[in-house]
Image: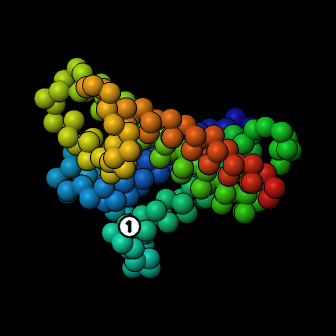
């Protein structure tokens, strides 16, 4: 039975994470005001349209942000965390304060779901920044360069306004990477520790 639980937990985690990444990318594309012709748009829409469309009837957008997609991502992450906590509690969170074999409650799962979304977004951001940098060095004429720049430009613009380049070296991506790591340590770590108090 333990092997079946592990297999089920793996499938839930793999499929759920794919859907969460697609939902976060959809939210990010719309927040960055990317056009519908963006190379990622067809894939993201195909994976998420089933849930976003009905959710939009319940939750309106706010200042150009597609809150329905974000709420759907959080709900999916919460259901995933509940299911994984029941099937395989050790997969959810390890560390001091977690009782072996104890499943997290709904409140702890809600906080862990938020931490998972934040962590996934930071991982996506780091991957996009690295891919954009590699493309600018290896294949500057690639059509993917501008497509990735659409995603990073809104986040890099306020940093570039304060951190000037040194010669031809743009320090803004490096600063954003450092901020991303701080978000992982303080934001994700803080939410996980808070979740322990509701375990």
Question: Of all residues shown, which one is farthest toward the top?
Answer: 138
Residue at x-position 22% and y-position 20%: 138
Is 93 on the left or on the right of 120, as rendered? right
Counting from the top left corner in percent of width and height, residue 130 is at 37, 30
Residue at x-position 73% and y-position 57%: 108
Counting from the top left corner in percent of width and height, residue 102 is at 83, 49
Please give the count of numbered marks on the rendered protein: 1
Q: Quadrant of the C terminus?
A: bottom right
Q: Quadrant of the N terminus?
A: top right
Counting from the top left corner in percent of width and height, residue 74 is at 54, 60
Counting from the top left corner in percent of width and height, residue 106 is at 72, 63
89 shown above or below 168: below
Q: Nearer the viewer, residue 40 or 67?
A: 67
Is 13 on the left or on the right of 27, as rendered? right
Residue located beneath label 1 in the image: 66
Residue at x-position 51% and y-position 40%: 180
Colour setup of the view: rainbow
Indicate the secondary structure of the residue bearing disc 1: loop
Q: Residues within 10 Å of mark 1 (few under 14, many from 20)?
A: many
Q: Would residue 20 be seen by someone viewing this image from the given angle?
A: yes
Q: Nearer the viewer, residue 50 or 182?
A: 182
Which image quadrant for residue 30?
bottom left
29 shown above or below 166: below
Q: Nearer the viewer, residue 72 or 117?
A: 117
Which image quadrant for residue 2?
top right
Question: Of all residues shown, which one is farthest toward the left?
Answer: 141
Residue at x-position 42% and y-position 64%: 69
Q: Would residue 15 be seen by someone viewing this image from the given angle?
A: no
């Amino acid at each position: 039975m333990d092997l079946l639980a592990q297999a089920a937990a793996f499938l839930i985690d793999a499929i759920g994470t794919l859907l969460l990444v697609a939902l976060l990318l959809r939210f990010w594309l719309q927040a960055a005001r990317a056009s519908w012709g963006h190379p990622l748009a067809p894939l993201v829409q195909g994976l998420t349209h089933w849930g976003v469309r009905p959710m939009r009837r319940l939750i309106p957008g706010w200042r150009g942000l597609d809150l329905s997609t974000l709420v759907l991502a959080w709900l999916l992450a919460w259901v995933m965390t509940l299911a994984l906590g029941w099937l395989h509690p050790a997969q959810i969170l390890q560390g001091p304060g977690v009782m072996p074999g104890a499943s997290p409650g709904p409140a702890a799962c809600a906080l862990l779901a938020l931490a998972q979304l934040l962590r996934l977004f930071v991982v996506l951001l780091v991957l996009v920044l690295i891919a954009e940098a590699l493309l600018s060095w290896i294949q500057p004429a690639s059509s993917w360069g501008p497509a990735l720049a659409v995603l990073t430009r809104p986040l890099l613009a306020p940093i570039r306004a304060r951190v000037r380049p040194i010669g031809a070296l743009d320090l803004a991506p490096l600063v954003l990477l450092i901020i991303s790591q701080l978000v992982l340590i303080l934001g994700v770590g803080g939410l996980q520790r808070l979740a322990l108090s509701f375990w």
